[in-house]
Amino acid sequence: MRLAHEARRIAAQHGYLDALESTTLRALERGDAAEMVAALRSFEGSLGAHFTLEEKVQFPALHGLDARLDPELAELVRDHGRFLDQMQAMRAQVDAAGVAHRSQTLFAFGQLASALRQHEEREESILTRAHAEA
């Protein structure tokens, strides 16, 4: 029962991040430097908080349920680090150059968003499998 709740909770958080991603993308498209920085900071902060919850609460619970999930969980944690590094680089670029590299930032954010969606699907798949086996 608790695992089903966690699966719904993660899916809801992913939905929130997807909505925030759309908001961030619109800010990047508008091209106002201050708005771009604020949007990237907001997305980065929300993403970091989500990753912390997964790494400190949800992933350890999954490990406790089935240690065979460890390789997949470790890969997800590595993804988290890469995503946050990419967000920091994008934000630093906008902080330094304003809108001068807007098209690069839009492209990089689009790539990150696509990879993040695939990542979310993998997480939800792991939870679904773990729930089915519990």
Image (tube, rainbow, N blue to C red):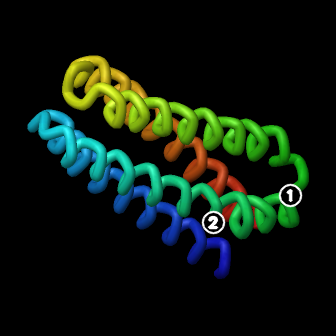
For mark 2, give the secondary structure: helix
At label 2, counting other C-alpha atoms closer than 10 Å, the crowd grade (few under 14, some 14-19, many 20 or more) is few
Q: Residue furthest bottom?
A: 1
Identify whether 35 is placed above or below 9.
above
- Residue 110: give x, y in percent of width and height: 32, 28
Under circle 1, the secondary element is loop
**Whole-percent x and y of residue 80?**
62, 43
Q: To which residue does mark 1 refer? A: 66
Q: Residue at 75% of width from left, 40% of height from top?
A: 72
Q: Residue at x 35, y 62 (%)?
A: 16
Report the residue at 48% width, 30% height from top.
89
Q: Would you name the residue on which mark 2 appears?
A: 53
Task: State which tag comes first along the sequence, 2 or 1.
Answer: 2
Residue at coordinates 70% horizontally, 37% vertically from top-left? 78
Answer left or right for 23 relative to 67: left
Which quadrant of the figure has residue 33? top left
Please state which of residues 54 and 28 is positioned toward the viewer in this rendering. Answer: 28
